[in-house]
Amino acid sequence: MDVTSPAFKENAARALDDAQLQRALGNIRHGFVEKRRVAADALPEFEQLRDEAKAIKDHTLAHLDLYLEAFCETVEARGGTVTFAETAYDARRAVLDICREHEAKTVTKAKSMVSEEIELNRYLKKKGIAPVETDLGEYILQIRDEAPSHIIAPAIHLNRDQIEADFRRVHTHLPNERDLAEPATLLGEARTILRQKFLTADVGVTGANFLVAETGSAVIVTNEGNADLTQSLPKVHIVVASIEKVVPTLEDAATLLRVLARSATGQDMSVYTTMATGPRREGDPDGPEAFHVVLVDNGRSGMIGTDFQEMLRCIRCGACMNHCPVYHAVGGHTYGWVYPGPMGSVLTPSLVGVDQAGQLPNASTFCGRCESVCPVRIPLPKLMRHWREDEFARHLQPRAARTGLGAWAFLARRPRAYRMLTGLAARALSLAGGTKGRLSSLPLAGGWTKHRDLPAPAPRTFMADWKARRGA
Amino acid sequence: MSAVPDDSAAPPRVGLFVTCLVDLFRPAVGFATVKLLEDAGCTVEVPEAQTCCGQPAFNSGDRATTTAIARQVIEAFEEFDYVVVPSGSCGGMVSRHYVELFAHDPEWHGRAEALAAKTYELVSFLVDVRGVDAVASRFEGGVTYHDSCSGLRELSIKAQPRKLLESVDGLTLAEMEDAEVCCGFGGTFCVKYPDISNEMVERKVASIEASGAGTVLAGDLGCLMNIAGKLSRKGSPVAARHVAEVLAGMGDAPAIAAGRKG
């Protein structure tokens, strides 16, 4: 996926002007927020579960090498294989090699953000293999040739009319006069088309919400059941998952599942929670003949031992973006890469470089709503601030901002000079505000006055007035 | 730590950290704060050496400047029994983030911790530390209260201002939808990303107007200047004030961004 994060501001301007997108974003602002609140409130131990979830991830990350090794051993003991992929290229290449080994022509895919990260679809297509997304939202995006705008609700930026138009454009073998006015009829049509794909696919690729070291299982949750059909019908199941998905035990995975769906959609559990453990055994009624896991690093091991290690706790619930007023304003595509919202604003600079993605951690008011709902208590504002520190140290910020900050910092450290200057500023601004008490434009303050008035100060600062009234 | 005030004890000495925005833009908030603190049995002093808490540098990634300013604040305020700030954002900076800054400096870390332990945002100090549960004040009309982000999420300020507002004669509180959602100020955010900030403050102002209240109150002047500036640009009749002004009975002065003669 091309990185358009450097154009964040332009992307944002476009998104703010897009009336259709703004209508679609309205659904996120309240729906997800209210559902999560109800689900969390209904569980007295929810806050404690968040602590436990955080502790499980912290412990695993502290011993990640050991748990990855253990996971490999258990997968192999059950007849599966594990491939470590250091880069995105290594990962998509590993998937291609497995597909070729099995002479695959078509691949069904369940929703997986890491497969977006490694650009799997584009690559397989180029190599003559047809990938088919089977999550409804992802399927819609695939026929539109668009990227997801949300990590759990990939097509949330679209409305029903657009989807109907896409289905009519692509499903030309179906009668033109068919009724697609209801979401249910759209769903029915997608289901009919995908059912055929499920039955004929040679390979099924899924992501994983958790990898269990104890059992060698890949845990996958969906609400549509498409991951189950993706992984049990074809001869080959490939799990593509990033290294931080591993947890020690099934019990740990169960604890994390308790916070995952509640934080994401407000459900107690997702509709389908499936554990895939190795290929079909003798006597199993179904399941793939081969089971492969591709473990993707792609920059994550470099985060271990740094300020950003905490980001690897993320379980991709999407609560941070569901609650983010900046995301609500501009939507997911504005962030310009795979991961949007607050989690993307921390992770994207780690994975593609802060020189590319530096806008993201700056485009936050640090309101802290993301951190307040994160099921694994990632201090997202603090980590975004760490990126700003990194940019500051590397002189990556605009010169005007640095100069302004420098001048202000000089004064802030010299109270007497500061006093003199604020005294002058108060008088000047107060005068400029006149009897209206506000300024509608001000040199060098266009960022402020473009959209709002600047309240004019009183003619004298508090410090001066206090001294005058109380002596000192 | 949050001792119930004891009338027989000497009044606590409170250092007022007035904040850079109140100092320059709204001195009335400073005087309202002094009145509320004195009414709550404190003696108030205003150290000369204060400028700003350092947040603009901190959130711009300039740790060296932030640390230098933090030292200056610690030196100016550590002699007091309490430090009170009429802002959740600056209060959170002193009581939460200074400690982080000095994680690797044992001497200053200790001093930062000591200061953090006695630093409070104004309204939470009145309610949680001084045990104030009512104010002798009058304000005619409906108000709605915006929960500023840092105060709400870093300092758990939610019930305290509402509790004191309920005791104000003539005042009715009308909650707005999404009172806890950011107004889009965010310090330098509002000038770095003016269009996104505008979208956020437009929504905030729409919630405020939908509440039907004639006045919006908050505990942070940054948010209030943003909200007041937007209300004024829209030509909205809704007035914006710092909560301290209303609690201190100073709610009849011109509102933020309003003209001096009405």
Image (spheres, coloured by chain):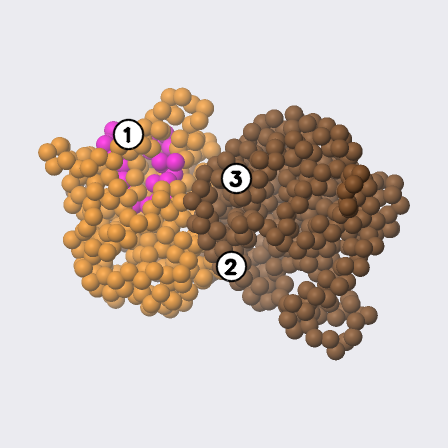
Label 3 with label 2: CB-CB less than 8 Å: no
Q: SS at mark 2?
A: helix
Q: Are marks 3 and 2 on the same chain?
A: yes
> Quick one: label 1, few (<14), some, or many (20+) residues within 10 Å?
some
Q: Colour of chain A?
A: brown
Q: What residue sits 21% from the left and 40% below the top?
A: B130
In the rendered image, which residue does mark 1 sit on?
Answer: B78
Image x and y of residue A174, in percent? 79, 71
In this view, the residue in front, A138 or B72, is: A138
- Number of callouts in the render? 3
In the rendered image, which residue does mark 2 sit on?
Answer: A31
In the rendered image, which residue does mark 3 sit on?
Answer: A376
Mark 3 and mark 2: span between their CA atoms? Answer: 22 Å
- In the picture, residue B211 is in which quadrant? bottom left
The magenta stretch spans which residues?
B69-96
> Quick one: label 3, few (<14), some, or many (20+) residues within 10 Å?
many
Q: Are marks 3 and 1 on the same chain?
A: no
